[in-house]
Amino acid sequence: MTAGKAIAAIIGSVLALVALGLLIGGGTLLWAHHSMRDADGFFTSPSYRLETEGYAIVARDIDLASHPGDWWPSDVAATVRLSARSSRGDDVFIGIAPEQDVDSYLSQVSHSVVRDFGERWDDVRITSRRGDAPQETPEALDFWTSYAQGVGEQTLTWQLAPGRWSVVVMNASAEAGVEVSAVAGVRLPILYPISLGLLAPGIVLAALASLLLLAATRSPVKGEMLEAAPAATATYPASVTGSLDGALSPVLWLVKWFLAIPHYIVLAFLWAAFCILTFFAWIAILVTGRYPRGIFDFNVGVMRWTWRVGFYAYSCLATDRYPPFTLQDVEYPARFNVAYPESVSRGLALVKWWLLALPHYVIVGIFTSGMWTWAFNDTLGEGSLIEVGGGLILILSIVSGFVLLFTGRYPRGMFDFLIGLNRWVLRVASYVALMHDDYPPFRLDMGGEEPSSQKT
């Protein structure tokens, strides 16, 4: 694969991720607009049960762009609807007003403040505040922005406006003991235009991403075919080889984490493309029973690049030769290849990447991500614990680095063992990436060369 195709695949994958986010966001909003509103166009909450032995129940701290300079969508109309019904059949009052006016009215009055609403009708957290009876009924006050009172269900509507607001529920007679069921709703006319505003660019970016990915992964023509790795005659479809350098610097490995940063950045994008293209390949396998050759070559190239960087850095530390920036198979101490399959099982494609690979995931997790932690007493922290974790491959690579540092020689036995661990990981990776149907063997094939006579 040429550098231009690699760049097209990376850009296409980034655009595909952005398009996916826009399409999910726009689709969710569009679905909510059509499916979650009532007949009047309101999104409604559950019916909450509110009770207090005091004289009022207050929901405060409703802050809507109350500070100078806060952004407020002045051209966007949003309507709130609040409904309340007394559980005892009393006249009920429900009103909304500026927070400072409500605080002044209830400062000496026994009431309760709602701190949190849960997901169930009875899941409400309320804090009680002691005080006396109010001096006036709520209807007699003139600071209400909107209110409703009477027998039965009372409903008020309010156009959202900047400020700090409080909602108050009381008995209309200002008597103690408030028991109501309350429902809140909001109508957002802007929701539909927002959903379309997300879907439209999402569709455009998805189309552009598709064109780039198709261009990047089209089947290679004569002259573009990737060169096969020397170990292509191995008995397993995925071939992993490595050659230990004879003269390694005792200290260079200490800074390879820094030297490899450019590769890590590029690989982050390449693996994003790898995941997206593998999904497309999965669809193609289910439909045709074949792995698209262009996608196959790209994905093998990403794994090949990753293996070269790992061999140079902290998956092996076995060479000081800087890895090339290419997806192609070139002369390098670490090489990787997968034999292209003429056909792939549709049925296995449904289960091998999760169900069949589960035992290997546990083993590979130990090799790579460290499914354990080493705990040490922290004498400076009054007996607290410091937890240090790491995969077996990383730990053994660091150990080999220290041996190299103090002796000037890389332990050959450790090298063979590390190659076996990495070979296991890459075999599993090629299997779960749907590149072939050969189940990875539960066997540690150590050494730099692939076994060519053993049966898998």
Image (cartoon, rainbow, N blue to C red):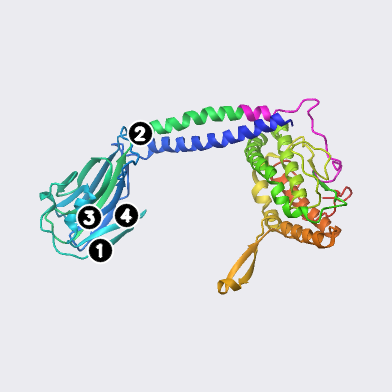
Specify the quadrant that holds the N terminus.
top right
User: Nearer the observer, disc 2 or disc 3?
Assistant: 2
Q: Which amino acid does label 4 sit on?
A: Trp
Q: Which amino acid does label 2 sit on?
A: Ile
The residue to which callout 4 is attached is: 121
Asked if marks 1 and 2 touch (Cβ < 8 Å), the reply is no
The residue to which callout 1 is attached is: 128
Q: Which residue is drawn at 14% across and 52% down?
A: 138
Whichever of callouts 1 and 2 sits on the residue coming sooner in the sequence is 1
Asked if marks 3 and 4 touch (Cβ < 8 Å), the reply is no
The residue to which callout 3 is attached is: 180
Q: What stretch is highlighted in magenta?
A: 211-237
- Please, what secondary structure does the residue beneath circle 3 have? strand
**In the image, residue 81 lies in the stretch drawn in magenta:** no
**In the image, residue 214 lies in the stretch drawn in magenta:** yes
- How far across and down, in percent of the image, does residue 9 sit? 65, 33
